[in-house]
Image: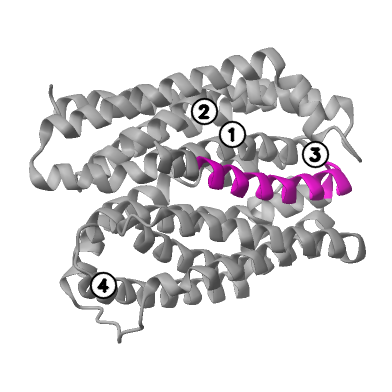
């Protein structure tokens, strides 16, 4: 319990400083072309990171947990070398070809908006490499169950970035926000570097790297498909009124902040423990821990929806109703979050179910479920947006998260019967 409280505090500080960063940009510039371009420019780097680095965390933590120190360090440096090289190559390719592919992701933008999105995307591709490195470093810390420093480093990096942003944004505009986000990722990787231990020459052919690739392959194949959701959202919202993309992005970020706090405080410590129970054959303890955390997330998610419905409008007005943000902007944001409520609950509880699969070394089942539900979701999302605009887009997103969660619970019960 003490660790969970400490992690909750650190995660809240991390989310808070990250939110302050977004809040300052949003209130200073207001929802419009510049913020739409900034958030659209984040999309592809974030999609690539979600596809690869999220999969890395799910695979590396159970794989490295319980290893002796020398083997863990050797395996970690091998994976780090591989990921650093792959992401650097990918960043160069995407950077050089950005003028061709970026406009295709925001077809509804005006020409000036497309050009600005290209510039901001290129800047944030550099940060993508730093984030990939950090994901391996985080996995090493989590495998050792050293959670506190791993959660403190983003706070330190975010505070440094926020102070720089306050000075730079009035002088250099939206381009400063993109560069500082990249610098923040670099600082985070630098702060996490000591956790890797003494460098060793990477062995890309050792058993751990091969096993990591074996486990991550189905995740990658599925994630390339169903984690392109932000691209679909940005594509559709580029046709909406100016500022709509920014408001939808902010709603997702606010819910993402809640999910991240729960992930850091509850789910991250859960995975290595479940992995050890699974490896030792302790089925009763495994199931008890899974169910306890499942119900905890359900209760927290429903409580969050009640709070949002009762006082969410007033809280949002207090938090972001400043500067160039109008009362109408706040009201629109609140309604978007209400419509996205199912995504909050489904996302929170889904972290427990998917992590339980991964703790067992099973990356295939959640990937197949994600592909099936996403295949139905994308066309329904497009149709919903066509007929009902941003409201239809948000509600279809809620339905998708809840349906995918129910599928995961059903198949977990089949694999882990009581």
- Most extreme residue toward the left is 281
Q: Are marks 1 and 2 in contact (CB under 8 Å)?
A: yes
Does residue 61 appear left or right of residue 129 in this picture?
left
Residue 60 point in image, percent of width and height: 30, 59
N-term-proximal mark, 3 vs 1? 3
Mark 2 or mark 3, earlier in chain = 3
Within 10 Å of disc 2 (Cα), the crowding (few <14, some 14-19, many 20+) is many
- Residue 217: image quadrant is bottom left
The mark nearer the N terminus, 3 or 4, is: 4
Q: Is residue 266 left or right of residue 363?
A: right
Q: Majority secondary structure of the magenta segment?
A: helix
Res 243 label: 3
- Residue 163 in magenta? no
The residue tagged with tag 4: helix, strand or loop?
A: helix
Q: Which residues are magenta?
A: 8-33
Which of the pair 361/287 is nearer the observer? 287
Can you give x and y, in whole percent of width and height, for residue 276 in the image?
Answer: 18, 47
- Residue 41: quarter of image: bottom right
- Say whether residue 11 is magenta: yes
Q: Which residue is mark 2?
A: 343
| Residue shown at 54% from the left, 56% from the top | 152
Can residue 387 be seen here? The reply is no
Structural distance between the alpha carbons of marks 1 and 4: 34 Å
Q: Secondary structure at mark 1?
A: helix
Query: Is residue 340 something one can see in this rendering?
Result: yes
In 3D space, how far apart are the residues under numbered discs 2 and 3 (Cα atoms)? Answer: 22 Å
Instruction: Find disc 4 in the rendering and name its residue.
Output: 75
């Amino acid at each position: 319990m003490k660790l969970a409280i400490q992690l909750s505090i650190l995660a809240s500080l991390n989310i808070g400083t990250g939110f302050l960063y977004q809040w300052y940009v949003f209130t200073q510039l207001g929802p419009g072309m510049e913020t739409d371009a900034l958030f659209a420019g984040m999309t592809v780097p974030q999609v690539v990171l979600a596809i690869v680095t999220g999969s890395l965390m799910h695979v590396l933590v159970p794989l490295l947990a319980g290893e002796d120190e020398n083997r863990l360090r050797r395996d970690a440096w091998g994976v780090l070398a591989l990921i650093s090289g792959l992401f650097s190559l990918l960043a160069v390719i995407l950077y050089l070809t950005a003028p061709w592919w970026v406009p295709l992701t925001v077809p509804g933008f005006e020409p000036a908006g497309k050009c600005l999105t290209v510039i901001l995307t290129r800047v944030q591709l550099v940060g993508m490499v730093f984030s990939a490195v950090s994901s391996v470093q985080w996995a090493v810390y989590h495998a050792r169950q050293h959670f506190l420093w791993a959660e403190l480093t983003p706070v330190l990096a975010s505070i440094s970035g926020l102070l720089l942003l306050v000075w730079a944004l009035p002088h250099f505009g939206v381009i400063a926000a993109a560069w500082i986000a990249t610098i923040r990722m670099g600082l985070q990787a630098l702060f996490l570097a000591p956790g890797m231990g003494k460098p060793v020459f990477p062995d890309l052919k050792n058993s751990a790297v091969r096993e990591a690739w074996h486990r991550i392959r189905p995740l990658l194949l599925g994630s390339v498909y169903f984690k392109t959701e932000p691209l679909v959202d940005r594509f559709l919202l580029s046709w909406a009124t100016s500022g709509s993309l920014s408001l939808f992005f902010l709603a997702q970020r606010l819910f993402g902040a809640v999910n991240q706090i729960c992930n850091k405080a509850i789910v991250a410590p859960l995975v290595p423990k479940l992995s050890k129970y699974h490896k030792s054959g302790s089925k009763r303890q495994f199931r008890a821990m899974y169910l306890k955390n499942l119900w905890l997330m359900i209760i927290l998610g429903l409580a969050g929806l009640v709070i949002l419905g009762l006082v969410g409008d007033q809280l949002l007005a207090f938090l972001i109703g400043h500067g160039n943000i109008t009362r109408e902007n706040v009201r629109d944001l609140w309604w978007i979050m209400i419509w996205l409520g199912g995504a909050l609950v489904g996302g929170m509880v889904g972290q427990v179910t998917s992590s339980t699969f991964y703790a067992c070394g099973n990356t295939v089942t959640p990937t197949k479920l994600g592909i099936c539900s996403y295949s139905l979701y994308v066309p329904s999302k497009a149709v919903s947006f066509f007929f009902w605009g941003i409201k239809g887009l948000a509600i279809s997103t809620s339905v998708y998260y809840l349906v995918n969660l129910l599928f995961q619970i059903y198949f977990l019960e089949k694999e882990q019967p009581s």
